[in-house]
Every structure is written in C-alpha cells, then in structure tokens.
Image (cartoon, helix red, strand yellow):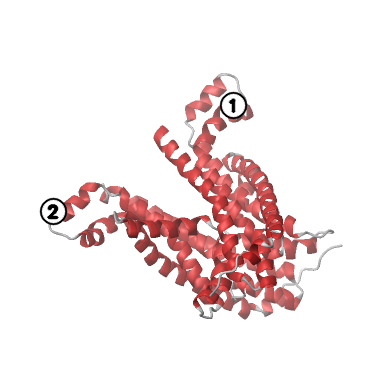
Amino acid sequence: MAYQWDFAPVVANAPLLAQGLVNTLKVTGVALACGLELGLAFALMRLSPKRWLSWPAGFIIEVFRTTPPLVQLFWFFFALPLIVGIEMTPFMAAAVTFSIQSSAFFAEVFRGGIVSIERGQWDGALAIGMSRLQALHRIILPQAVKRMIPAFLERSIELMKTTTLVATIAYADLLFAANEISQKTFRPLETFTVVALIYFVVITAFSLVARAFERRLAVSGESTVH
Amino acid sequence: MKWDFVSVFANTDALLAGLLGTLRLFAICLVLGLSLGLVVGLGRYARTRWLYWPASAFVEFFRNTPVLVQILWFYFALPILLPFEIGPLMAAALGISLNSAAFSAEIYRGGIQSIDRGQWDGARALGMGFIQAMRRIILPQAIKRMMPALTNRAIEIFKMSTLASAVAYVELLQQGKLIASLNYNPIEAYTTVAVIFFLLLWPLVQFTYVLERRLKRDE
C-alpha cells in the first residue's frame, strides 16, 4: 500500500502559507519589541531596594516563567476580556501574552547582565556626577547588553516557536494555515510536512544568523568589559 | 463582577482526571525524552560519521521546529503512512519526547565534554572499555553538572504537556476548557488551572535554583 504523495494542492495554497508566515513574524516581532522594553522595566523594578517595586515585579516574573504559555494564552483570550470588559482579538491576546511571557524571561537576562557588571563601574559613574539612571543608561547597560546578546537571541528563537500556540485560538499564523489547508485539500501529510519544513528553514536561518553574530561578538571579546 | 469558584470545585473530578492525564504524559515524556536524549547525545559525541550525522540531523530538526507542529504532524500526518491510528496520547508523547530528546542530547553532550580528558585516560589505563568508562567514570561526574539543566528540561516537559490539549488529550488545560464551556465560567476555570500549574511547578523551579547555586559553590 504505497502512498501517492501529491504536493500540488499544497503548492496551490502557497498564498495562504505566505500570509500565515507573515502573521507568525508579526506576532513574534511585536512580542519581542514589547517584551524587551517590559523586560528591562521588570528587571529594574526587581533590582530596586524598594519592596513595593521589587515584589510585584518578582511575582509577575515568577508566575509567567512557571506557568505553561498555553495556559497564559487561554487566560488572556478567554478570561481577561470578561474581567476588563474589552473584546480581545486573537492577535491582541497573543501579543499581550507573549509580550509579558517573554518579558519575564528577558527580565532575568537583564538582571543577570546588570548584576554581572562590577560595582566599581557604578561608583565611577556616580563619582563623576551622573544620576543612577544616567549611570545605568550610559555606563552599565552598554556593557551589560553585550554579555546578554546570546541569551536574547536564544530566547527570541524560543519565542518564535512558542507563537505557534496562537493557532489554538484561531489566529491565522502559519500553523493555523496548515490546519486550514489540510482540511480543505484532505492532504494532511503533505501540508504538515511542508509547514514543518518551512518552520525548520526559517528557524534554522535565524539560529545560524544568531550563531554568526555570537562568534563575531566572541572575537571582539569581553575585553571591553574587563 | 462576581467570582464563582464553586462551579469549578463542583468539577473536581474532571480536574483530577486532567491532573492524572498531565502526570501520565509528563512521566512518559520525561523517561522517553531523557533516555533517548542520552543515546542521541552519545551519538553526537561519537567520532564515527554514521553515528554523528544522523544524531546531529535529529537534534537540529527537532530543535528547530516548534513542538506543537511536531505533535500535529504525528497526529494528522503520520497515520496516513501507517497501517494504524495514532491516538492523542501517542501523538503528544511522540512529539514532546522526541523534542525533549533533542534538547537533552545537547545537555548530555555538553556535560560529557566538560569532563577532563585525563579522566578518560585514567579509565582506559585501568583497562576499562568505552562503555565501562562512560558508565562508571564519566557519566557520574557529568550528571552532577547536568542536573540543573536536566531539571529545567523536566519543567519544560511539564509545561509542554498542555499542548496535548490541541489534539484533545485529557489533561488539565483540556479539562479547564471543558469546565469553562459547560459552566460559562472561563475566568474561574482558567485561573484555577493556572494556579494548579503554578503550585505544581513552583517547588520544582525553586529546586533548580538550589541546584544551580550548589553547583556554582562546588566548582
């Protein structure tokens, strides 16, 4: 019983796949941009000596790192709209969930990076009359970010893989397009194989870029830090 | 609005069934994923090409595709090539186990590589073969260094088990969905599910922190 492979029906639906890929990248991009900003904010809050700042940040970080992302997504899509009384589109729910979720991970990366910078750098910056915010912005972060880049890249790739969860709340990402095409064409084998390959190619491309970038960083070295 | 957790607790049976499903899937994937990972990791450590290449291809493929895509592939696509059906549990277990095998293979490889060359030489000098040296000398030392990363993997596997709800496997999130749609109480149902996951995973996360700290202190 040899199976007759037929990729033509899948190829015929290429526009649907392309739109799906664009939507996948859109969610990833938005979550990445917001997640980084929010992650820095959470990291600074958590590092703050003031408890009313550090505790809430610590709580959010722990909750979002500890619970499964799909549970978070369902909560934001099905539960939150009823609490706040705002209709949530699948895209909004996905953007909010993955922004906060990735920010929790980014916050720990930021925190690790900031803490790794030697105390003397702070003292020096404060001694020449900078405020703490200035010192952070001009002296500490530029050095810390360099050390954090590999972790950021890895996390971004994880994020792109996590965005496939949006298919379960009917946002038209690449995986959702696969579901649609396979139901339409009765060709699940070809459709899901093609979609798996598309993900593989895109994610491999990203990780190759990330690795090349890390290697260049390794060449320019930690010398600027120490 | 009024919170109504009573309608959730009235369905404790359903939640327990879900919890059991989650734990079953977790146990299967933990055992399969981590043991297969060791095999693949050793393959990637091997110098013979016919071991190295397939192991590397496996790792790259499963690391660079989303696990939900893998689960759906096993559920919808693979049965077409097989003479038998693949149920939700099997599809989810296959996807999550193979994915975890690929990730843990890299942990094993890194751990084994981190052991000083001299340990190998010493074991060889005592007349041990590769397998013996690996089992008695290298792995016991490497496992200690790998513990934090492996525990992290276990946590990831636990979280990934929720993806099985996408193929309607009866686990916690799936049961939460069911309760929410029967009682129109998504807020309480999903909050309860989130809290259960948090309570189950929180101790495990804290445990990895302890392991990490202990390792840092010992080295």
Find residue B136 and name its label.
1
Residue A7 appears left or right of B194: right
Please tell me if label 1 and label 2 are on a single chain: no
Image quadrant of residue A129?
A: bottom left
Report helix, strand or loop for mark 1: helix
Report helix, strand or loop for mark 2: helix
**Discs 1, 2 touching: Cβ within 8 Å:** no
Residue B184 appears left or right of B144: right
A151 vs A110, nearest the viewer: A110
Farthest residue in the top direction?
A: B126
| Residue at image location 62% in from the left, 59% down from the top | B67
Task: Report the residue marked by disc 2.
Answer: A127
Marks 1/2: CA–CA distance = 56 Å
Q: Chain of mark 2?
A: A
Q: Looking at the rendering, in which quadrant would you find the C terminus of chain B?
A: top left
| Residue at image location 58% in from the left, 47% down from the top | B154
| Residue at image location 80% in from the left, 68% down from the top | A4
Residue A93, compared with residue A71, is above or below; it is below
| Residue at image location 60% in from the left, 60% down from the top | B193
Q: Residues within 10 Å of mark 1 (few under 14, many from 20)?
A: few
